[in-house]
């Protein structure tokens, strides 16, 4: 194990680790908290809940977001729900079972201790959210309702129609507003972090661009928390929001924070298929639909042909001519297998020529049986807004014809490496939510992203950051006039000047689309050595072309969305390369990472625990130099490592 | 499909704005309105600068700025006033969920930013909706600290009340209600938050205070009064009912009586 990777996992039994850590953590007294400043970057579930909770504790918090309001962060788009080990259904759920499902779902590539803590605090998240006034779905007796989700056999998912992410974010945003009103938090909307500032080896501030005036500004603090989400938009087409980006994480990486498991990207099985080449965004249909929807393709090629030519409708295909391939291949979990398994199964059927639309890249998600079993009203209550959304986009009604779906990039399990305290390899720099790597291993289960964002923000970081800050309260406010800040600002200015000076002929998006195609082709649902090497070469070439021929119109000192995109794309190039390096190194199939060279005879993913049971943490070694790999071995002391089996 | 786009261009908050007309062709029926604008911007960028705009002395050539993010109707960022309607001709959608099949081939489409004293233009079609954040900071929350909560099932809420609260909580904060209202009132936005919380036992404790503080902030920030035209309800992409305004008024009156 690299001496730079100290995971700080507390000793002792699994169920006592978090209590032990909390007991050992040094506290900061209220009068000292007032002297300490914390920067939180990002206002999704992680950032908003962290900023609000840290403000409540009495710290001085500055919170930054790129949108016009903290409420627009992409957590808002999460549809299906949030997991918690409440066992309100009496279906034998428990903290241990949620922990076990998450570790297994992540294909044994997450840390036991972190995941156990996540499961442990999950119940308190629901309590907190209800107290904030989040209108979760209720049963007729007034008690909270639950639904089940992929990869598990209990009902532990809490939901607010198909808008759970929205409601949870509005709850965290409301708490944030409360603190902004109280004066403990200052909000900087339409500000984009462009560099991390390090003083004497510790994170002490950021450089940000005011997106309205274009001014470059310096902000100092005693600690910095990164909560800027994932890097799924490296693929150009993804379910992420248009402005979601991985730039803050890359800035930290270039300043010395290790980046862990970058190749673990989740491909979500239920997205609306791509239509034509004018598209810029893919729309997710919630995984919760797989609770009652059945996934199928025709058994006969002639039916496929007729569907593609619009000669028949899906509803006209007889029951015996339908291949419910998930139920066939995975009888125990059926349509509720984890996302990576469902995505690969869809790809397998489409590659075999059974795709049901003109492009051959779509399968059916059918509610016919659910409507017959539950009735129109029940189905409408559960999925009404999703059906509406689908119809708005496709002009086809799921009430009459099955939905068409296909996998798309959705979430990134990889991220900034953090220890048990969620601190990165740079002291004073913390990473929470999707921005870190810690809890989902090789694959994230449905309804667990919301859980992790809020667990980190409400219950973990407010405690663990105290240990670091307990040694800092005697330090004065960070002076932003020092050489470190001046140099960082100069670096940002040079980057911007360079982009404007190119004055080429092609738009930023045209390059981003090309990067997306390279990524999807070689670093997508199936990866192999040759392709990955090709990807690295092609990304390098594309990057070179970008620096010769990109056209960034306008000027720096104005609202300039093209400049924003250009700066983000520079970082996407780097992430893309890093993902390919990591995928190349990981010569096993595991979770969302499928290496063609590593599969069973039945085509299932084949893990290689003997050689790859570790976290791959990459260290930046300078521009155009290969990053250095550090390994954090994963030890499973409390759980038996098995081959994932969703068949029986 | 092809269209003539009459688009509001304004260099910054202080500059005077004006309309520019652009022609665009080769648009798929299934393209969304914002994808169409992406394609227009691609044209405007690769043409270097738009010659038509320069001919007419346009100060803001180059791509058209507009707010957008999730592109699935939930973040509330997109905010275009299209052919005289907030979010365009389709009902109950945000601009990003509007598809070109709703327009006639060859049509001239007028695109403007939200027009409201409380939402100053930042550039082109982008406005500053910071006033909405300020209204919510005035009281749009329940004062609970992290960690203070009791077990979630100790608070029983009837299915119907929870559903009604959720109807109001569906507000995405886009500002279509303000842009549509002839008085530039934010009543539907304020009411959605007040009502959603007032319907729940957790939110009842501060309900009166909340209503008073949020309404006072709304007035202070230059939003107009509500004269019950119900235009906001018609144009709300989430179909939020003006019945919530009635609940806001009740909470507001209760607060006034107890003063």
Image: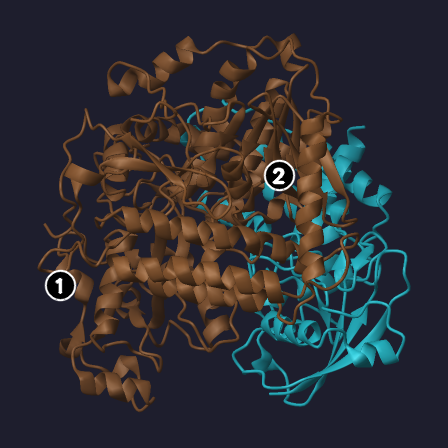
Residue at 27% of width from left, 33% of height from top?
Answer: A99
Does B144 appear above or below A472? below
The quarter holding residue A224 reads top right
Of residue A526 and residue A174, the one placed in the foreground of this image is A526
The answer to whether residue A238 is seen in the rendering is: no
| Side of A154 where A622 appears, left or right | right
Of residue B172 and residue A326, the one placed in the foreground of this image is A326
Residue at 53% of width from left, 61% of height from top?
Answer: A544
Mark closest to the chain's N terminus, 2 or 1: 2
Secondary structure found at label 1:
helix
- Among the chains, which one is cyan? B
- Among the chains, which one is brown? A
The quarter holding residue A189 reads top right
For label 1, the residue is: A328
Does A352 appear above or below A183? below
| Side of B10 where A62 appears, left or right | left
């Amino acid at each position: 194990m690299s001496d730079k990777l100290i995971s700080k996992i507390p000793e002792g039994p699994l169920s006592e680790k978090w209590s032990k850590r909390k007991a050992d953590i040094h506290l900061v007294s209220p009068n000292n908290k007032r002297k300490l400043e914390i920067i939180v970057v990002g206002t999704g579930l992680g950032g908003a809940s962290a900023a609000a909770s840290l403000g409540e504790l009495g710290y001085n918090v500055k919170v930054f977001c790129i949108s016009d309001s903290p409420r627009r962060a992409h957590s808002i788009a999460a549809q299906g729900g949030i997991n918690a080990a409440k066992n309100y259904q009496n279906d034998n759920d428990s903290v241990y079972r949620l922990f076990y499902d998450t570790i297994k779902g992540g294909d044994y590539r997450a840390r036991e201790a972190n995941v156990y803590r996540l499961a442990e605090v999950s119940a308190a998240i629901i309590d907190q959210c209800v107290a904030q006034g989040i209108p979760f779905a209720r049963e007729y007796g007034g008690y909270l309702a639950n639904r089940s989700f992929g990869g598990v056999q209990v009902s532990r998912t809490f939901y607010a129609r198909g808008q759970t992410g929205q409601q949870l974010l509005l709850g965290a945003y409301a708490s944030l507003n409360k603190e902004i009103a109280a004066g403990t938090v200052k909000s900087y909307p339409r500000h984009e972090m462009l560099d991390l500032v390090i003083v004497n080896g510790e994170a002490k501030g950021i450089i940000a661009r005011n997106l309205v005036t274009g001014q470059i500004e310096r902000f100092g603090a005693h600690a910095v928390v990164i909560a800027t989400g994932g890097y799924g938009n490296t693929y150009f087409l993804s379910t992420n929001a248009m402005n979601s980006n991985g730039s803050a994480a890359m800035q930290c990486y270039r300043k010395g924070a290790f980046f862990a498991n970058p190749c673990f990207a989740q491909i979500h099985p239920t997205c609306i298929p791509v239509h034509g080449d004018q598209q810029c965004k893919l729309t997710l249909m919630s995984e919760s639909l797989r609770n009652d929807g059945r996934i199928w393709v025709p058994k006969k090629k002639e039916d496929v042909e007729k569907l593609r030519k619009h000669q028949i409708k899906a509803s006209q295909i007889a029951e015996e001519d339908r291949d419910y391939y998930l139920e066939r291949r995975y009888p125990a979990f059926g349509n509720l297998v984890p996302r990576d398994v469902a995505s690969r199964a869809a790809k397998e059927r489409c590659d075999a020529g059974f795709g049901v639309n003109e492009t051959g890249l779509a399968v059916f998600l059918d509610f016919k049986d659910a409507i017959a079993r539950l009735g129109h009203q029940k189905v409408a209550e559960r999925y009404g807004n999703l059906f509406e959304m689908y119809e708005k986009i496709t002009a086809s009604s799921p009430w009459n014809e099955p939905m068409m779906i296909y996998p798309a990039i959705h979430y990134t399990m990889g991220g900034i490496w953090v220890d048990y305290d969620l601190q990165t390899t740079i002291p004073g720099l913390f990473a929470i939510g999707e921005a870190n790597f810690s809890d989902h291993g090789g694959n994230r289960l449905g309804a667990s992203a919301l859980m992790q964002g809020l667990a980190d923000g409400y219950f973990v970081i407010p405690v663990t950051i105290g240990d670091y800050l307990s040694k800092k309260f005697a330090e004065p406010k960070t002076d932003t006039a020092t050489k470190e800040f001046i140099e960082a600002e100069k670096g940002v200015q040079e980057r911007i000047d360079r982009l404007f000076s190119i004055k080429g002929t092609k738009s930023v998006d045209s390059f981003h689309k090309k990067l997306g195609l390279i990524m999807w082709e070689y670093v997508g649902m199936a990866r192999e050595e040759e392709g990955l090497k090709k990807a690295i070469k092609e990304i390098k070439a594309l990057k070179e072309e970008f620096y010769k021929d990109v056209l960034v119109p306008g000027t720096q000192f104005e609202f300039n969305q093209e400049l924003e995109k250009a700066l983000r794309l520079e970082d996407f190039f780097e992430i893309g390369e890093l993902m390919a390096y990591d995928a190349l190194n990981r010569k096993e199939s595991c979770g969302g990472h499928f290496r063609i060279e590593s599969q069973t005879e039945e085509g299932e993913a084949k893990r290689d625990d003997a050689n790859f049971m570790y976290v791959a943490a990459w260290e930046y070694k300078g521009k155009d130099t290969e990053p250095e790999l550090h390994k954090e071995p994963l030890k499973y002391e409390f759980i038996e490592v098995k081959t994932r089996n969703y068949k029986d | 499909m092809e269209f003539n786009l009459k688009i509001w261009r304004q260099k910054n908050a202080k500059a005077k704005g004006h309309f520019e007309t652009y022609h665009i062709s080769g648009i798929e029926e299934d393209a969304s309105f914002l994808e169409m604008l992406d394609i227009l911007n691609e044209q405007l960028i690769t043409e270097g600068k738009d010659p038509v705009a320069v001919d007419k002395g346009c100060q803001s050539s180059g791509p058209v700025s507009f707010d957008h993010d999730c592109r699935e109707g939930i973040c509330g960022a997109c905010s275009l006033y299209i052919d005289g309607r907030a979010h365009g001709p389709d009902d109950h959608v945000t601009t990003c969920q509007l598809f070109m099949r709703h327009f006639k081939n060859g049509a001239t489409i007028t695109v403007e930013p939200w027009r409201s004293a409380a939402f100053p233009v930042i550039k082109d079609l982008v406005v500053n909706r910071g006033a909405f954040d300020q209204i919510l900071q005035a009281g749009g929350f329940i004062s609970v600290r992290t960690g203070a909560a009791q077990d979630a099932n100790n608070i029983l809420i009837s299915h119907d009340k929870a559903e009604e609260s959720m109807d109001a909580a569906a507000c995405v904060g886009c500002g279509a209600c303000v842009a549509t209202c002839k008085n530039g009132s934010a009543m539907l936005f304020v009411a959605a938050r007040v009502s959603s919380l007032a319907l729940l036992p957790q939110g009842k404790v501060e309900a009166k205070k909340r209503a008073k503080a949020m309404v006072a902030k709304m007035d202070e920030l230059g939003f107009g009064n509500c004269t019950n035209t119900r235009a906001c309800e018609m144009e709300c992409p989430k179909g939020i009912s003006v019945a919530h305004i009635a609940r806001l008024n009740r909470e507001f009156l209760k607060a006034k009586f107890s003063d």
